[in-house]
Amino acid sequence: MWKHPLTWIGLFLLIALVAVWDYSPEDLLRAPPEAQTRFPQAFMVASETRRYDPEGQLQYRMLSERADHFQHLPNRSSPKDYSLIQAPDVTVFGEDTPPWQLTARLGRSDATGETLVFTGEVRAWQQSANGAMEITTPELQVEPNRQFAQTDKAVTMRSPQGRHDAVGMRADLAEDQIELLSEVRGTYEPPQGN
């Protein structure tokens, strides 16, 4: 039975069919991981990005030293695409509140640009009539269109009224509402009366 060449060819084809059965056409066309290049599909140097709301009001502005865009699939967009942003500097504008400024050493944007993750010496601050509010953390997830920021890392918040340290934070930047999530410790100094 095994001496006939058609039996061997049939067995080989059956094994090949089983091996290929679980792969999509994109998987078959993609180069093996060790052969894939890690070069950006596109890049920008000294870029400025602005986002406006439907009424034409500026929601946020982002400056960066360099932004590199990486595509997961060659020649077409996919949900796995991302951008790496060097030295992001974002200003988030609220309707009735002073703007928030956010900076970091590195940022990563998802394929849609709806979510940014800042890492490395992340700093957020706002200058208001009551003085400056500053937040520092090693990592911050920002949704600029929603004017929302959050982290599950250590946070330090400083203001003229004192200092608070915590683990985790959620911030509605448009409404100036900040929620410290756990292990909150701080000092508070009431404003001096005139």
Image: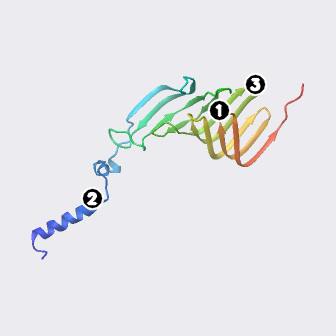
Is 81 placed left or right of 139 in the picture? left
Residue 6: where, in percent of width, then height? 11, 68
Residue 89 picture location, percent across and down: 57, 30
Q: Hey, what amino acid is under mark 1? A: Ala
Q: Is residue 56 above or below residue 141?
A: above
Tell me which numbered mark, 3 or 2, is placed earlier along the sequence. Answer: 2
Q: Where is residue 2 drawn, in percent x and y?
A: 13, 75
Kind of residue at badge 2: Val
The residue that disc 3 covers is 129
Q: What residue appears at the point 57 percent right and 23 percent down from the top-left corner?
A: 57
Mark 1 touches mark 2? (CB < 8 Å): no
Query: Where residue 190 sits: x, y (%)?
Result: 85, 34
| Quadrant of residue 180 within the rendered picture | top right
In the drawing, what numbered circle is on residue 20?
A: 2
C-alpha span from label 1 to label 3: 16 Å
Residue 16 found in image quarter = bottom left
Q: Which one is earlier in the sequence, the residue at label 1 or at label 2? A: 2
Q: Secondary structure at mark 3?
A: loop
Asked whether the beta carbons under mark 3 and mark 2 sit within 8 Å of each other, the answer is no
Write down the residue under mark 1.
Answer: 174
Tell me which numbered mark, 1 or 3, is placed earlier along the sequence: 3
Residue 150, image quadrant: top right
Who is closer to the viewer here, 67 or 61?
61
